[in-house]
Image (tube, rainbow, N blue to C red):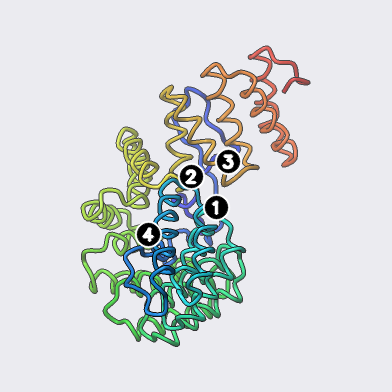
Amino acid sequence: MTFRWLARVCSGAVIGMTAGSVAAATLASAAAVNALPSARLTLPVEVNLAQNRRANLSDAEQEALDELLSEGQEKVEAEDYDGAIALYREATRIDPQNARLFSGIGYLYVQQGEYASAVEPYQQAIRLEPDNLPFRYGLAFTYVQLENYTEAIAAYEEIATLAPNETDAYLGLGNIFITLEDYEAALDTYETLTRRAPNNARSYEALGTLYLIQEDYVAAQSAFQRAVQTDRSRSESYVGLAETQLATGNSRAALENLEEAVRLNRNNAQANFLLGEISLNLGDEDAAYAYYRRAAEADPDLIPAQAAVGAFHLREGVYLQAIRAYRRVLQAFPDNPGAHYNLGLALWAEGLKTQAVSSIGRARRLYAADDDIDSVERVDALLELWGVDQDDG
């Protein structure tokens, strides 16, 4: 079974500039992994400048260290991360046993997306303070970003060994196993988590999402219901329950749960997106547009919402916003011909004709590669209408 709510990305059935419908495409159900409850992949705080005096430092060394840290923090606030790293490395020569200095260096590398460079300072911080869990989470996060899942698994397992009731370690492990499509390992991990944290709703949300990916809707619904019973204040639990109800055709119950999710958290992007889907199915396009816009604003990286709101922007003549929406879609799906086609329409309407022709030409090549003759002919007709030679497109 496929899910319309997983897949509002432009397809070959692209809307025209005045069309009244929104095109939809289908993604694999594994795309539901994007909705997984997030493990603690947050980063440790910057170097704490208000540290107590280090007993092993002389007055001169302490003064030099404080000055370096103060200058380093100024560099951080100015987003001069390379400058801050250089200062913190100099500080480690004065105080080589200060684990926070090394974790701060790792943090700053991560801030720049230099994940490979972050590994060594995090490892050094852990060697100095083996029981510091934020350092270990920072290292695990770094390995995940590097897609070094073997080391990431090891890092999370070490956290779970040190702190057996640490929920985020199990969530991190489960997310990795799902990424690797090792659903049996993910199930074992989440079941262990529910035993260790029976009063933590996120445990049941993770289990429910795994079942949803596997299209075991009965088990998924049971897990999400348990999540709601455990903690009625979590918007995410109601969204998960609604997803199982949509999958089984119970849209009325799904609507009620999504409205509760939005009541608890007005900016829950997924809840707003699904409400947009339901509203569109009910023929209430104004409500759908409002929900899609709220979803896209709450989470600009929610690509189905960007595609949906982009289509509405295009239809309503809000071309600059349509351009922004479709460019975000193309960042995630660079070879989606429908997104290139719709982007081209918005660019042309905004007077950016050279860019429009380039985008439409890219759509044509992608359609041709897919042997989508009808779409190629539609592109050719559009280029003829625009007075553009085929060689130019």
Task: Measure the C-alpha gap from mark 1 to mark 4.
Answer: 44 Å
Quarter that holds the C terminus:
top right
The nearer-to-camera label among 3 and 1 is 1
Quarter of the view holding residue 247? bottom left
Q: Secondary structure at mark 2?
A: loop
Quarter of the view holding residue 216? bottom left
Q: Taking 245 as reference, is 335 left or right?
A: right
Q: Is residue 94 visible?
A: yes
Instruction: Spot the residue most to the right.
Output: 391
Q: Taking 2 as reference, is 171 left or right?
A: left
Residue drawn at 35 percent across, 35 percent down: 289
Q: Is residue 363 above or below residue 95?
A: above
Residue 198, given in percent of the width and then of the height, sits at: 30, 82
| Mark closer to the chain start, 2 or 3 | 2
Dot 1 crowding, Cα within 10 Å, few <14, some 14–19, many 20+: some
The residue under label 2 is: 8
Give the camera-side residue of 47 and 331.
47
The residue under label 4 is: 243
Residue drawn at 55 percent across, 23 percent down: 347
The nearer-to-camera label among 1 and 2 is 1
Q: Secondary structure at mark 3?
A: helix
Dot 2 crowding, Cα within 10 Å, few <14, some 14–19, many 20+: many
The residue under label 1 is: 82
Task: Measure the C-alpha gap from mark 1 to mark 2.
Answer: 40 Å
Which amino acid is tagged 4? Glu
Which amino acid is tagged 2? Arg
| Mark closer to the chain start, 2 or 4 | 2
| Contact flag, marks 2 and 4 (Cβ < 8 Å) | no
Report the label total. 4
The nearer-to-camera label among 2 and 3 is 3
